Image (cartoon, rainbow, N blue to C red):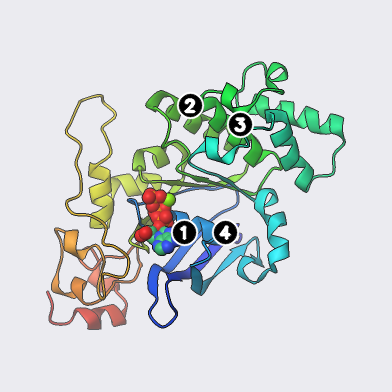
């Protein structure tokens, strides 16, 4: 097997004073293969955005990396000098944010903004740049792109602006496209169109995708594999089909019950009882335990490790652990608690 394109291992991020830090990410492991589309899913506050910001080396100033390694195509991103990062951003990894209006420049034409992205990373003549801008606008489905080159962001609808954002992100053929809740601000019809577009872009360009969403339904539309996060921990990792047919973590099971059924039957949407604990409030054990119907005594004492549940399938849960294959360390922790 070839090495993954993105390989995040044991990533921990903290806020606050060093003497009394609040840990937000707890040993996150996440890989994205070459050309693979991976979904990163979890409720608000689970650490999805911080994971992607750490990858781009764009963490807020108050945050620091307490441990971990982030490799992109064999290069250690965390040890690159700061001045090397602008080249990585945009050329190797591109990011699409949730709110296109705040990420687009209101006083620059669409052509200028896409052109600028190309200029930063590729040596092209003006005519070559224009040809590339038109090519990308066509790829992202902007109708009559020649006529829209001189338009400003406010002259586009929300869905069209999101297409422009995607155009800027793919202008330099990034190896990895990170899309953080790219459809949350859009209505359902436009959301479906943007997801179709992400799928098309991936097929046309072969770029790998990390799609962040709180919605498993969204992720299933685009991704091959899903990583589920809860409260700064990766709790499950599986192929999309496996995740939907055989979820191993009670949290994933809860998220799945909250996905609206596609048969159009109006069911009352399930919500997992309780809410994500504020960072730093869970001192020991599994952070999902207070909300978990399958909770056992050990869950409140010790966080389970991710263990293998099948081919390419891992989950971190004491209750669904196959004890026959559990590591000795885990069995010891469980002693006398069932
Ligand atoms: N600048 C900051 N200072 C302190 N805590 C922060 C800061 N930024 C984020 N956090 C905390 O880190 C945790 C994870 O935040 P993150 O933005 O990664 O969540 P998320 O999974 O992307 O959520 P959402 O779905 O709402 O976007 C949250 O509990 C948040 O309160
Ligand atoms: Mg976020």
**Nearer to the camera, 74 or 2:** 74
Dot 2 alpha-carbon crowd within 10 angstroms: few under 14, some 14 to 19, many 20 or more:
some
Does the beta carbon of the residue at mark 1 sit less than 8 Å from ligand 1?
yes
Decide which of tag 2 and tag 1 comes sooner along the chain: 1
Give the quarter of the figure containing the C terminus: bottom left
Asked if the residues shown at circle 4 and circle 2 are in contact, with their CB atoms under 8 angstroms apart, the answer is no
Residue behind mark 2? 193
243 horizontally vs 153: left or right: left
Task: Give percent across and percent down for residue 257.
Answer: 22, 43
Does the beta carbon of the residue at mark 4 sit less than 8 Å from ligand 1?
no
Q: Secondary structure at mark 4?
A: loop
Residue behind mark 4? 58
Q: Secondary structure at mark 2?
A: helix
Residue at left 45%, top 80%?
18
Q: Nearer the viewer, mark 2 or mark 1?
A: 1
Residue behind mark 3? 164
Decide which of tag 4 and tag 3 comes sooner along the chain: 4
Q: Secondary structure at mark 1?
A: helix
Task: Give percent across and percent down for residue 307.
Answer: 34, 67
Decide which of tag 4 and tag 2 comes sooner along the chain: 4
Give the quarter of the figure containing the N terminus: bottom right
Q: Quadrant of residue 155?
A: top right
Decide which of tag 3 and tag 1 comes sooner along the chain: 1
Gap between marks 4 and 2, in whole Å?
Answer: 29 Å
Gap between marks 2 and 3, in whole Å?
Answer: 13 Å
Q: Nearer the viewer, mark 4 or mark 2?
A: 4
In this rendering, the answer to whether 320 lies above or below 145 is below
Numbered circles on residues, count: 4
Q: Which mark is residue 50?
A: 1
Asked if the residues shown at circle 1 and circle 4 are in contact, with their CB atoms under 8 angstroms apart, the answer is no
Q: Is residue 79 visible?
A: yes
Decide which of tag 2 and tag 3 comes sooner along the chain: 3
């Amino acid at each position: 097997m070839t090495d993954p394109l993105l390989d995040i291992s044991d990533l921990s991020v903290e806020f606050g004073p060093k003497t009394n830090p609040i840990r937000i990410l707890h040993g996150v492991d996440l890989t994205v293969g070459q050309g693979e589309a991976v979904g990163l899913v979890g409720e608000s506050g689970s650490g999805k955005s911080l994971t992607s910001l750490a990858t781009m080396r764009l963490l807020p100033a108050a945050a620091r990396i307490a441990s971990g390694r982030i490799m992109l195509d064999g290069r250690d991103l965390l040890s690159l000098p700061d001045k090397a990062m602008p080249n990585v951003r945009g050329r190797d990894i591109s990011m699409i944010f949730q709110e296109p209006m705040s990420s687009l420049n209101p006083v620059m034409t669409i052509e200028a903004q896409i052109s600028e992205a190309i200029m930063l990373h590729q040596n092209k003549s003006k005519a070559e740049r224009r040809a590339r801008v038109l090519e990308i606008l066509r790829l992202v489905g902007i109708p009559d792109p020649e006529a829209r080159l001189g338009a400003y962001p406010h002259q586009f609808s929300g869905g069209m602006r999101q297409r422009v954002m995607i155009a800027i992100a793919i202008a330099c053929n990034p190896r990895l496209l990170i899309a953080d809740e790219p459809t949350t601000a859009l209505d359902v019809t436009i959301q479906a169109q943007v997801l179709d577009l992400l799928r098309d872009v991936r097929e046309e360009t072969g770029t790998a995708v990390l799609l962040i969403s709180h919605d498993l339904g969204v992720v299933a539309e685009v991704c091959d594999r899903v990583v589920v996060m809860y409260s700064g921990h990766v709790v499950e990792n599986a192929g999309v089909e496996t995740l939907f047919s055989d979820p191993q973590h009670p949290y994933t099971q809860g998220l799945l019950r909250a996905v609206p059924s596609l048969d159009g039957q109006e069911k009352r949407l399930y919500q997992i009882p309780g809410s994500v604990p504020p960072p730093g409030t869970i001192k020991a054990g599994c952070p999902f335990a207070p909300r978990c119907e399958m909770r056992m005594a050990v869950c409140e004492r010790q966080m389970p490790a991710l263990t293998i549940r099948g081919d390419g399938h891992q989950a971190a849960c004491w209750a669904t652990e196959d004890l026959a294959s559990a590591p000795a360390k885990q069995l010891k922790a469980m002693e006398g608690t069932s």
